[in-house]
Image: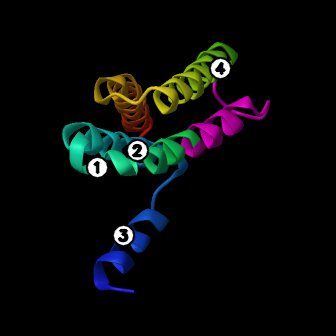
Amino acid sequence: MNISQRYAETEVSGMNQVELESRALIKTASRLNQIKENWEKQRGDLNEALDKNRRLWTIIAGSIGDNTSPQPHELRQNLLSLAMFVFKHTLEIVADPKPESLDVLININMNIARGLAEGASTQE
C-alpha cells in the first residue's frame, strides 16, 4: 500500500456517516463526469461506474428505508423515490448509452452531496 492510499484510509476513518455519503456521491459523480467528458476514450468504463453509483444508491436507500432512520418520514420517502429514479435511469443508460444521459445522475449526486454537506455544517 502506498502512502496516498494510507492517507486516504486514515482520512476516511475519521469521517461521520454523512461526510462519507457526501464524499461517495461526489466521487461517483466525478467519475461519471470524467467518462462523459472523455466519452470516446472512457466509454468502456461506463458500466463499472454506473454499477458503483447504483450500489451507492442501494446503500443510501437501505439506510433511509430503515424505520430507525433519524430523518423525517417525508424526506426518507423523497430520497427513496429519488433512488428508484436513479435505478430506472441507470437501466435506460445501459440500454442506450449516451454521454448527455449521464448529466441527470451527475446532477442528482452533486445536489444530494451539497445538501448533506450543508446539513452537516448546520449541526456543528
Residue type at numbered disc 4? Pro
Residue type at numbered disc 3? Ala
Can residue 12 be seen here? yes
Return the mark for residue 113. Answer: none
Can residue 27 be seen here? no
Residue hosting label 3:
8
Q: Quadrant of residue 100?
A: top left
Residue 69: x and y, percent? 71, 33
Q: Is residue 68 magenta?
A: yes
86 displayed left or right of 71 = left
- Count residues near mark 2 (Cα–Cα under 10 Å), then give few for <14, some for 14-19, many for 20+: many
Residue farthest toward the right in the current orientation of the protein = 67
Q: Residue at x 34, y 41 (%)?
A: 32
Tell me if residue 99 comes above or below residue 16 in the rendering.
above
Residue hosting label 1:
42
* SS at badge 2: helix
Residue hosting label 2:
46
Residue type at numbered disc 2? Leu
* SS at badge 1: helix
Q: Distance of mark 1 from mark 3, alpha carbons?
A: 25 Å
* SS at badge 4: loop
Q: Say whether disc 3 or disc 4 marks the residue closer to the N-terminus.
A: 3
Q: Say whether disc 2 or disc 3 marks the residue closer to the N-terminus.
A: 3
Which quadrant is home to the C terminus? top left
Q: Distance of mark 2 from mark 1, alpha carbons?
A: 7 Å
Q: Distance of mark 2 from mark 3, alpha carbons?
A: 24 Å
Q: Nearer the viewer, mark 2 or mark 3?
A: 2
Tell me if residue 6 comes above or below residue 57 in the rendering.
below
